Image: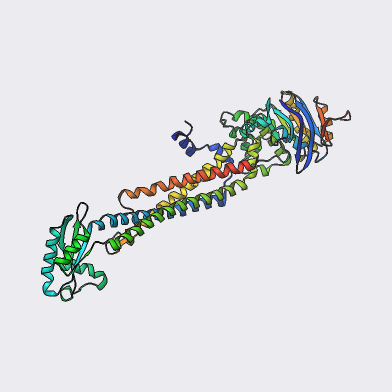
Amino acid sequence: MIELENVAYSYGGGELLSDISLKLQPGSFHFLTGPSGSGKTTLLKLCYGALLPTAGHIRLFDTDLRAMERDDIALMRRRVGVVHQDCQFLDHMPVSDNIALPLMVSGRDLLSEDANLKELMTWVGLTSRGDARPPELSGGERQRAALARALIMSPDVVLADEPTGNVDWEMSQRLLRLLVELNRMGKTIMIATHDLALIRAAKAHVQARVLRISNRRLQLAGADL
Amino acid sequence: MSSKFDLSKVTEFLIGDAQAERVVPPTGYTASLTLFTAAAMAFLAVFTLALSLATGRLADRWGDELARSSTIRISAPEGQMAAQTEAALNVLNTSKGVASARALTDKEQRALLEPWFGPGLPVDSLPIPQLIEVIEEGAGFDAEGLRLRLAAEVPGAVLDDHTRWRKPLVRAASRLRLLGWVSLILIGAATAAMITLAANAALSANEQVIKVLRLVGARDGYIAQAFVRRFTLRALGGATAGVVLACLAILLLPAAQAEGGFLTGLGFRGWHWLWPLIVPPLAAGVAFAATQAAARKTLKDMS
């Protein structure tokens, strides 16, 4: 599905990631942890083709990233749902349209997808906030809206970067439950977080593989997690 | 063939994708800038077109009509004027290449002098030379041969075949016409430059929007089209307004009059009124190409 082989990434003369090998199997659940600035976000960006590796190979759905044209990468992103910590919405459009944005850009008919959109908004608990503008949402609502947007195309993989970074514990548990539920539906999940308590809480509900970035390299986290 | 003009694609572009239109936020000052630029440039383009066509008409008239006519001026003592005029007409009527020749009447001569001396000029009491208008036919007459014959038979006659002053006038009118076309090209280039600047400003202001669109799987073509369509339609609207205003202004110009000469003949004539109609589509085409190039470059740079 997503495979990294001896990947390195350098920026500004310094190497951020080195010799990273990773394989996301269908239906797997991964946590990616490490201290701030260790390269978690960079690794996620490599996984959805937002960055190109300076060494090694990345295969996304059996195609080498380097062989992909920009349009190919755009099409591939429709199969990968991405949730950012800062969410990134189009502030001039209502929340429901922001969630439906992937459908719009892929040319799907919104009317025929209306039932799916409503079901998804109900699932993330945003039914009453559909007409609001993104700046009017709370931190938790923004994260749930971002998750809904990432799921609207029914992607095979969901990559979430610090999805609980701006929310309280109760909301982070609610988001985690949604992600675990998605995994049970067969989606591949990878969450980058420095919140070890979240990882411990998740392990009670799902069999997750915990990876840690340390000294630019990726390693399996110890039993303490 | 991919290069073949496809009307359905143009229609599809003009109708647009209502969903794609919504993803780009309304852009305040770049919208006004594009509208104003397109309107002002279209206004100037129509005037330049009118000037160019008018100078073209003038060059053609001077080139064709004046080339077919000459003047003979007879300066003779009062008692010999009629005889010398008669003799000159006889010479002309027997010259090859002369279609017709006639002496101007006093009224016609007065009309020629009126712009300089004012009305009521007593032509009869002034020692004014007699003018004979000569119209050529075929390849025209042999000017040197005619001058020699006139010198021998009509001592007071001087042939003026207009060559001396007609050539520089025709050359000036042709240059003015060329200047008009060059101005039109410059107006098009300036429009393209200004719309490129406005498009670049809009694209830069929407960098975050572009990032979000890419994140959710939008192709560059989709993103570019959202901007290109908006700028193209604005240029089309602005240029249409500019053309309407320019046509109204030209309609309000004084009608062509002989007394006003070139300056009162600046407007369009006959089917030439159709020329302004090509300005809005041309402006839209320029905007389309300029925005397309700006969007492609910006999106490539943002990769």
Of all residues shown, which one is farthest toward the right?
A: A224
Q: Residue at x 45, y 51 (%)?
A: B185
A67 left or right of B47 in image? right
Residue B134 relative to residue B211: left or right? left
Q: Is residue B109 visible?
A: yes
**Figure quadrant of residue B106:** bottom left
A117 is higher (above) or lower (below) than B60:
above
Relative placement, left or right, of A207 versus B173 is: right
- How many numbered discs, if any? 0
Judging depth in this view, the residue of B14 and B74 nearest the camera is B74
Q: Position of residue B293 (x, y in %)?
A: 55, 43
Q: Position of residue B30 (x, y in %)?
A: 55, 50
Front one among B91 and A10: B91
Is residue A119 positioned above or below A137 on the image? above
Q: What x and y, as percent, mark residue A89?
A: 66, 40
B32 or A61: which is nearer to us?
Answer: A61
Q: Quadrant of residue B87?
A: bottom left
Q: Residue shown at 57%/46% (left/top)? A: B26
User: Residue B252, can we see it?
Assistant: no
Q: Which percent across, then down, holds residue A174?
A: 76, 33
Colour theme:
rainbow
Question: Quarter of the image containing the C terminus of chain B?
Answer: top right
